[in-house]
Image (tube, rainbow, N blue to C red):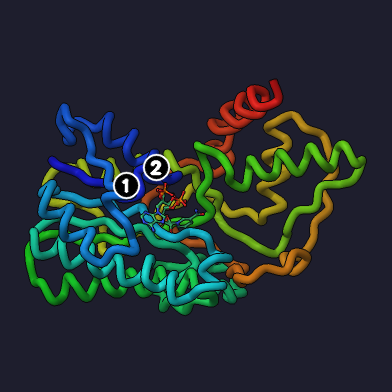
Amino acid sequence: MRVAVTGPGGRLGRALMASLADAPFTGPGGPIGWGRPDYDLDDPAAAARLVERDRPELVIHAAAWTDTEGCARDPALAMRRNGHAVGELARACASAGADLVVLSTNEVFDGRRSDGRAYATDDEPAPLNPYGASKLAGERAAAEAWRAARRGSSLAIVRTTWLYGPPGNDFPSKLLAAAERSAQANEPLRAVNDEIGSPSYAPDVAEAIVAAAGEDGPFSLGRIEHIVNGGVASRADWARELLRQSGIAIPIEEVPVATWPRASTPPLWGVLAPTRPLRSWQAALADYVPILLRQRAAAAR
Ligand SMILES: NC(=O)c1ccc[n+]([C@@H]2O[C@H](COP(=O)([O-])OP(=O)(O)OC[C@H]3O[C@@H](n4cnc5c(N)ncnc54)[C@H](OP(=O)(O)O)[C@@H]3O)[C@@H](O)[C@H]2O)c1
């Protein structure tokens, strides 16, 4: 199967490329990465050009403008990159008969739910910020392209939350750096206790998508999937577990998210009901901590 991945250098994109390279169904050539400059979310013709050039049977769309603060400052550009660009890719895939997986986010929901129930795939989205609005526009543009094309190929929307993993520059790596600064200043580490989600390890999410894509028969992902590691945590819970697994003893001071004013308002309850069981977020984190600690030791040398 010829499989193309957009954003192959991103956190999830690189994990998808690795999982696909190991998958038997991608053949000896492995997956095709559609990165910049060939694939640019700002170029309305890019998707059609690449679909025509490479004739993929499956496209996994992991490219996005994920800078939520940038999206809040420029909602029109967010809509261009995370909304319109998905429509263009979906129309190109639908008319060529290629399957498409579009990555999306818990931020399509406002996170105001207070009944402790995880968001299900059939809950009505209501984004709170321009990033979430642009990602929801992307979901809807893809669905509209499929409705209009009425062809036999499959479309799946895969929502995930709180992604972390190589190459770093993620919550765990920033938190370890902050812990070091706090230790030097002899102060507790401040961590947010009212933002709740499911930390999700990019390699686990990638593997689940690739496993589904490789199952026998037709492309077997559902219309909307929620793919996240198991369990629920506040940012402070995540920080505490990370420090414990890293062997760093430093007190944590729990603070509300409003402590740090931001351009984008994050949904406080970002919990998605998983459609495929993955291991717990703590077990996944344990695979990443040694990688992070090695990276930090190498950087300190
Ligand atoms: N990060 C999270 O916590 C999170 C949570 C839920 C859902 N998601 C969704 O999961 C997907 C993957 O996220 P991620 O964390 O892997 O994102 P990421 O690490 O920020 O990677 C984004 C990718 O998109 C590419 N990209 C950005 N702007 C582009 C442009 N104008 N033209 C072409 N490519 C562009 C980047 O290319 P370069 O490498 O060239 O910069 C990069 O490869 C996205 O759909 C995101 O919305 C993420």
Q: Residue at x 72, y 69 (%)?
A: 261
At x 44%, y 60%, the residue is 65
On the image, the x and y values in percent for residue 176 come to: 71, 39
Q: How many marks?
A: 2
- The amino acid at mark 2 is Gly
User: Could you tell me which residue is drawn at 25 percent across and 67 percent down?
Assistant: 44
Ligand 1 near label 2 (Cβ, under 8 Å)? yes
Could you say which is closer to the camera, residue 18 or residue 219?
18
- Name the residue that disc number 2 marks: 9
Q: CA distance from mark 1 to mark 2?
A: 7 Å
| 46 shown above or below 7 | below
Left or right: residue 10 versus residue 267 is: left
Q: Which residue is mark 1?
A: 35
Provide residue 5's location: percent of width, then percent of height.
28, 47
Callouts 1 and 2 close, C-beta under 8 Å? yes
Where in the figure is residue 43, as x and y percent of width and height?
29, 63
Q: Judge from the rendering whether residue 104 lies leftward or rightward of residue 67; answer left or right.
A: left
Determine which of the numbered discs, if any, sits on residue 102 in the image.
none
Q: As rendered, which of 189 and 234 lies closer to the eye?
A: 189
Label 1, residues with CA under 10 Å away: few <14, some 14-19, many ≥20: some
